Image (tube, rainbow, N blue to C red):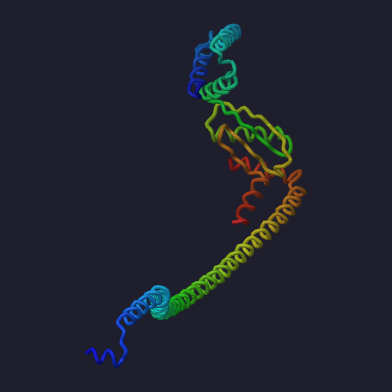
Amino acid sequence: MSARETKELAQVLLEMTDENPESREEAHVKKTLKEFATYLKKKGLLRKADAIIADYRRLYNKKHNIVEATVTLTSRLSEHTRVELREALKKKHNAREVHMLEKVDQRLIGGIRVQIEDEVYDSSIQNSLKQLQTELLK
Amino acid sequence: MDSLITTFHIDWKIIIAQLINFAVVFAVLYVFALKPLKKLMDERSETIKGGLDNAEKQKELLAAQEKEYADALATARAEAAVMLREAKKDTEAYRAEMMEKALADVANTVANGKKQIEADKAKMIEDAKKEIVAIVMQATEKVLGEVATGKVETKLVEESIKNI
């Protein structure tokens, strides 16, 4: 099964669960998911479920203008900083909503690393040192 | 005639008898002496003549062999001289070729050596550079790790957020 077919299945699932207010109702969503899972099982596509779910998330976020960001720092964000970051990302991506997954990694030394899908904004000291090292070794 | 016969007491019978005797003696001598002797003499003469012919033939053969030997010797000498000249030429050419090859080998070895030295030098410099950079990075990392805490860290993050 190709990535295109996975995306098409995710699109179908999105249309079935997010077409109108009725389709978004919990009972309807549960029923639809059950039917969809049965279909995947019947077609032997259950092993592709993770890829379909990932595509579904992307399509859903795109449709609802939601940005999912993985934020890595050396310590937890303060509430004030979190709000600032969320607003900055909303502004940059013109997003309605920003979902942030925070990770702590001491290897960053300092600064912040934000990943949104394939786009990475890295202002960590670790990254700066890496760039400096590359320059020095040229 | 009769007087003559009487004077000399010639007796025809005796004369005839003597003639017969002489004939018999001659015949016996001829058969048993002269004939074998003549045969022996002839054989002897033949043997001597054959020996002389043979000696002549041997002499001629010897002369021919001597000439043949001399010719062969002259040819061999000429061939040996040619071969010697060729061998000398070949040796000189081989020596020159070997010399050229040896010089080329030496030049090649020197060039390779130079290249190797250059490569080693470059690698040494590169390794030293890497090592120095690694030490600098470690030190910087340590210093920054100690500095980038608390307010400095918060400030860093806030600055980063402003630049997004």
The residue under the point 53% across, 14% down is: A13
Determine whether, in the image, residue B138 is placed left or right of residue B61: right
Between B50 and A38, which is closer to the camera in this rendering?
B50
**Number of residue marks:** 0
Above or below residue B55? Residue B164 is above
Q: Position of residue A4 (x, y in %)?
A: 48, 23
Above or below residue A97? Residue B163 is below
Between A73 and B64, which is closer to the camera in this rendering?
B64
The residue under the point 58% across, 26% down is: A97
Asked whether residue B58 appears in the rendered view, the answer is no
The residue under the point 35% across, 80% down is: B18
Determine whether, in the image, residue A8 is placed left or right of residue B142: left
Between B64 and B99, which is closer to the camera in this rendering?
B64
Q: Position of residue B140 (x, y in %)?
A: 72, 53
Farthest left residue in view: B1
Q: Position of residue B119 (x, y in %)?
A: 60, 62
Q: Quadrant of the C terminus of chain A?
A: bottom right
For residue B123, which quarter of the picture?
bottom right
The residue under the point 28% across, 90% down is: B6
Asked whether residue A131 appears in the rendered view, the answer is yes
Q: Position of residue A20 (x, y in %)?
A: 50, 11
